[in-house]
Amino acid sequence: MTIKPPDSPDGKKSQMWGGRFERGPAAIMEEINASIDVDRRLWREDIEGSKAHSAMLAKTKIITEADANAIHVGLDRIAAEIESGEFVFSKRLEDIHMNIEARLKELIGEPASRLHTARSRNDQVATDFRLYIRRACGETAAAIAALQAALVRQAEKHASSVMPGYTHLQTAQPVTFGHHCLAYVEMLERDRTRFLDAQRRMNECPLGAAALAGVPYPIDRAMTAKALGFDRPTANSLDSVSARDFALETLSAASICASHLSRLAEEIVLWTSPHFGFAALSDAFSTGSSIMPQKKNPDAAELCRAKVGRIAGAFNALLIVMKGLPLAYSKDMQEDKAATFEAIDDMALALAAMTGMIDDMTMNEGAMREAAMRGYSTATDLADYLVRTLGLPFRDAHHATGSIVAAAEKKRVRLDELSIADMRAVEPRIGDDIFKLLTVDASVAARASYGGAAPDNVRAEVKRWKEKLR
Ligand code: ARG
């Protein structure tokens, strides 16, 4: 960006609001004031809103049918011009609303000047932005569902593939990879419904609030609300033009979702590292190193891990823009869009990349099983045996099992490689049947409590999710 000197004389008086002005803005004023580079993205919503508004003005006889028709023809032509790339956006015209209105004037003349009756850019931008974010919420929810479906496919394939479950990233108890995938499906379902909740809550139409106080014309706000797919018009004109919590709520949902993606991404980074070796991404989802020929890097996972930084940054940016703003509209609020648009794009990209990776990823069942067998992962099963079969109180069983683990550690063997004599040295009543309980398969199969890791549970949950996501 080149910034012209502040007293640059080239600013002409605004045709839109320059009536009471003697001269045009300084170049730097134009520079800081213009939002067209960002809000041109709202062109579809702006045209849709203007069509609904002008149709309502005609219906209520505030303008003539002929004027409304001319306005519609002009707006359609502008849409075609923007679509084809021939529309010339001008910074002097500040924003998308005035760019479109000025072009409409060029195209159809006087009727264009009647379009802004009973409306202000304040309710106009509030409406456009809601329409945009409402659609983005729906698209994000659909993208989340696609990721869930990919995870369910992996869960189905790996309903009984044993892997180590961790707490503190220390081997805890065996689980299955399917169960692990379904944990993310649950998380993502909360994310998905958060976007849909936000979408439902924002679905009220601010159009007709005008600058801040409503209008003295007999407008029909229910008509415009309905035409634009809103449930109803907003009930308070001051709130209508000054609320941006619909964007904040969406960004907070995005921040939480991005933080979930970062956790899954981190796991992919771990699983694909040679130290774990649980998973591999194909060449399609890996990158090479410019210096180390052997490297295959999970860059997409790392970028998904990072996206939360920008997305939560956007949430924070808008939250701080909005903090302390008195009612009603303030120009600060023009700063709501850049970060929001970027966050919506980042969210879509991260979800699509993650879906691609999950579908691409092949699991190494042998390596997962091998790892699950290390770290005395079935020690809890031994303790549970002492409780259930021998009637020990759990605390005593925990203590005895700890001694048996220590014995195994001393001999550098797994629990199931200890002799029965070693075990009986700690608890003489342990039976030979203990060994079949100490396998990782027996361990996961035993976790059949509701929500537990047992393969049968995983299969039932896969079935439930497949129906739900269909
Ligand atoms: N470009 C402005 C925005 O995005 C539109 C509303 C301008 N309103 C005003 N009173 N200057 O917020």
Image (cartoon, helix red, strand yellow):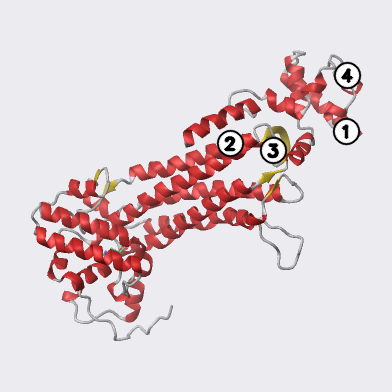
Q: Mark 2 points at which residue?
A: 182
> Label 3 amino acid?
Tyr
Q: In which quarter of the image is ligand 1?
A: bottom left
Q: Residues within 10 Å of mark 3 (few under 14, many from 20)?
A: some
Report the side of 197 relative to 373 (left or right). left
Circle nearer the N terminus (2, 1): 2
Report the side of 308 relative to 205 (left or right). right
Residue at 48% from the left image edge and 37% from the top image edge: 469
Q: Position of residue 345 (x, y in %)?
A: 46, 57
Q: How far apart are marks 4 and 2 (CA)?
A: 39 Å
Q: How crowded is mark 2: few (under 14 residues within 10 Å), some or many (20 or more)?
A: many
Q: How far apart are marks 1 and 3 (CA)?
A: 21 Å
Determine the secondary structure under disc 2: helix
Residue at 15% from the left image edge and 67% from the top image edge: 113
Circle nearer the N terminus (3, 2): 3
Q: Name the residue under label 4.
A: 424
> Label 1 amino acid?
Val
Q: Up-down: is 463 above or below 116?
A: above
Figure quadrant of residue 173:
top right
Determine the secondary structure under disc 1: loop
Q: How crowded is mark 4: few (under 14 residues within 10 Å), some or many (20 or more)?
A: few
